[in-house]
Image (cartoon, rainbow, N blue to C red):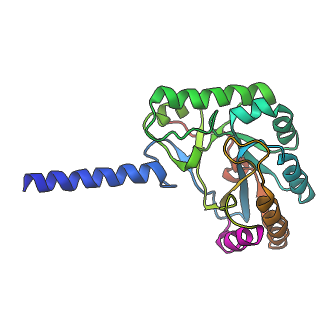
Amino acid sequence: MFLELLGGAGLAAAGITAYGVRGKSSQLFGPSVWRGPSHRKAIALTFDDGPSESTLDLLSLLYDYQARATFFQCGHHVRRLPRVTQRCALNGHQIGNHTDTHQTLYLRSPDFIFEQLDRAQRIITETTGVTPALFRPTYGARWYGLRAAQKRLNLLGVMWTVIARDWRLSAAQVASYVAPRVRPGAILCFHDGRELIHHPDISSTIGALKLLLPQWLDQGYELLTVSELLGDKRPART
């Protein structure tokens, strides 16, 4: 009986840990959000893995629709394309931390996790003059040590309400997948890069947004940064 109870407890603990790693509403490994308040007809567009050579095309599209967004950028790419990161910030978009070299944080040491966040934090701050307040884990995976790193760097984690799957679907498929899932307060995850790849193809992302942006504006949505959606630019502390 004792062994059975012990086995059951182990399974329960494993389940809790698994949810903490990938569950978008989990707070186990650090404070985070996955949606904003629903009382306002607004959504937040977010873009991961950039900046890339194609980010400027995306910025032009967002400008055409007066949409503000949040770019979760990798330190590696910021060093490579600092002017693109600067342009994102100058255009009124928010820059968030997406680790330094797009390494998974899952099963990594606390020192490794902190270094990944800290290096990205430093280069983004140096490049834009603004210290990121938001962080998104690569692959949406978190681990022990992340809470302490977020606290030291004053970062709020941001997951997503809907992930666009724009790395593998066509533009039409992305638009068809995302459109019916959008609700007031949604945080949408797209990509303007592909991990550490140079010159990535983000045509599906841009093509989908050409279909979605006019729909959202016709429906009366405001397109805001994550901090604007949350109504508070200060990250949560624990």
Please say whether residue 17 is visible from this viewpoint: yes
Q: Is residue 74 left or right of residue 51?
A: left
Residue 149 position in % (x across, y down) = 52, 31
* Residue at the image point whose x is 88% and y is 56% from the top: 61
Quarter of the rendering containing residue 167: bottom right
Residue 235 position in % (x across, y down) = 61, 39
* Magenta highlight: main SS: helix
* Residue at the image point whose x is 55% and y is 49% from the top: 140
Please tell me which residue lies in front, 70 or 206: 206
Q: Is residue 97 magenta?
A: no
Please tell me which residue lies in front, 103 or 186: 103
Q: Is residue 210 above or below residue 116?
A: below
Q: Is residue 183 magenta?
A: yes
Please tell me which residue lies in front, 157 or 172: 172
Quadrant where the N terminus sits is bottom left
Please tell me which residue lies in front, 68 or 73: 73
The magenta region covers 171-184
Q: Is residue 53 left or right of residue 73?
A: right
Q: Is residue 35 above or below residue 121?
A: below
Please say whether residue 152 is visible from this viewpoint: no
Residue with the most extreme left position = 1
Q: Is residue 236 above or below residue 57?
A: above
* Residue at the image point whose x is 79% and y is 28% from the top: 127
Q: Is residue 189 left or right of residue 89?
A: left
* Residue at the image point whose x is 67% and y is 62% from the top: 168
Residue 197 position in % (x across, y down) = 71, 43
Residue 128 position in % (x across, y down) = 80, 30
